[in-house]
Image: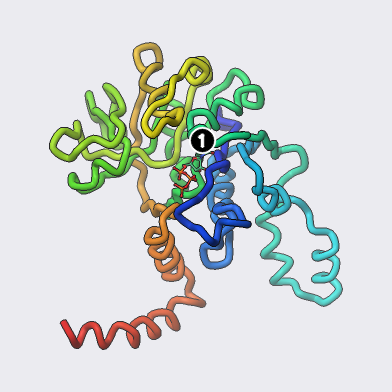
């Protein structure tokens, strides 16, 4: 049995990088091939043994709640028409009754603020945070890898990946004190450092396992970068009392909060689907041939 039972999904962001698509639908409902982003995150959490799913939502995010609800009329129609494949596709969206909770963030005051709003629902136990924008393609779910490592380390844990040094200013970066295998014990987290002063090239991506002490830090947090309440600031504040480890997960992360990352993720996941791959490769070969000839 896992010692991490609850996961928080902060989904209250405005998704401005995807406007106008996100004007009337939540970013987390954008489909990567045929599944919305939120489904990838929930599947990863389930694979890690999560039993309770807490969504921090905002105005205009109602489609997310409906997505995980039963669609009785639709299912009945599919059944009557013998559409078994379509019915099976709905299976993934089925969540045991009572396992989903929604808490509302009225104003987008930052990721730290959003996570802090889950305090009452999380209670006094370690919990996971998954940012659905960060889609991770991995042989074994990234969160499951972290949960296994956290069983030994305890304390706060952040997922990390190596980035080229010239990109450090786009990420939170780990200040590494010592390393052992995939684990890096951190001296601190540095928000978006310039490449020449970045303490490492281990970037933090959207998976966290946090001890409940984080809620006290979040409650006392002042505005950080961009005037928002930053989760990394709260983790840093807790660092002297509760250790922080980075976990370099096995897998590939796509930033689906950006259009470029979303397109790349689509291609990567198409290549994993035998029924789509061959036709896609032929199409791309055809499309890119003129470019290759120019080169
Ligand atoms: P982002 O920085 O990607 O912000 O948030 P965003 O608003 O979603 O997207 P852009 O930049 O406007 O395109 C990172 C994560 O934190 C959540 C987001 O939903 C996303 O999962 N978040 C951010 C909140 O839940 N509340 C906030 O106030 C800010």
Q: Disc 1 on helix, strand or loop?
A: strand
Q: Quadrant of the C terminus?
A: bottom left
x, y percent for residue 147:
47, 34
213 or 220, nearer to the observer: 220
Asked whether, in this view, residue 207 is left or right of residue 95, the answer is: left
Residue at (44, 76) in percent of width and height: 277
User: How many badges with numbers are in the image?
Assistant: 1
Vertical comparison of 8 with 165: above or below? above
Residue at image x 19%, y 88%? Answer: 293
Question: In the image, residue 171 lies at what x, y percent?
Answer: 31, 40
Q: Position of residue 190 (x, y in %)?
A: 28, 29
Cβ of disc 1 within 8 Å of ligand 1?
no
Looking at the image, the residue that sits furthest to the top is 241
* Quarter of the figure with the N terminus: top right
Q: Position of residue 217 (x, y in %)?
A: 47, 17
Task: Look at 59% across and 44% down and name the residue there.
Answer: 46
Considering every residue shown, the one lying at the far left of the view is 196
Of 6 and 192, nearer the camera is: 192
Q: Residues within 10 Å of mark 1 (few under 14, many from 20)?
A: many
Could you tell whether 187 is left or right of 81 in the image?
left
Residue ID at (43%, 41%): 206
Q: Please tell me whether residue 74 is drawn above or below residue 119 in the rendered image.
A: below
The residue that label 1 is drawn on is 129
């Amino acid at each position: 049995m896992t010692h991490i039972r609850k996961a928080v999904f902060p989904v209250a962001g405005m998704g401005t990088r995807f406007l106008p698509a996100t004007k009337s639908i939540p970013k987390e409902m954008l489909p990567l091939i045929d599944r919305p982003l939120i489904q990838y995150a929930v599947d990863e959490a389930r694979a890690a043994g999560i039993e309770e799913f807490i969504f921090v939502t905002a105005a205009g995010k109602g489609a997310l709640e409906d997505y995980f609800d039963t669609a009785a009329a639709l299912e009945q129609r599919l059944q009557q028409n013998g559409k078994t494949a379509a019915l099976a596709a709905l299976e993934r969206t089925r969540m045991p009754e009572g396992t989903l909770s929604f808490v509302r963030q009225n104003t987008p005051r930052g990721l730290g603020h959003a996570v802090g709003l889950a305090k009452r629902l999380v209670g006094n136990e370690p919990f996971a945070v998954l940012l659905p924008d960060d889609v991770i393609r991995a042989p074994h779910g990234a969160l499951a890898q972290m949960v296994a490592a956290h069983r030994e380390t305890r304390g706060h844990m952040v997922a990390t990946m190596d980035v080229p040094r010239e990109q450090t200013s786009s990420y939170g970066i780990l200040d590494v004190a010592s390393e052992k295998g995939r684990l890096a014990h951190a001296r601190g987290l540095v928000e978006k450092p310039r490449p020449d002063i970045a303490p490492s090239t281990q970037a933090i991506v959207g998976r966290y396992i946090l001890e409940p002490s984080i809620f006290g830090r979040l409650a006392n947090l002042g505005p950080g970068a961009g005037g928002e309440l930053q989760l990394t600031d709260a983790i840093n504040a807790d660092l002297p009392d509760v250790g922080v480890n980075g976990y370099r997960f096995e897998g590939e992360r796509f930033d689906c909060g950006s259009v470029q990352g979303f397109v790349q993720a689509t291609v990567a996941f198409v290549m994993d689907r035998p029924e789509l791959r061959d036709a896609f490769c032929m199409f791309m070969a055809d499309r890119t041939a003129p470019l290759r000839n120019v080169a």
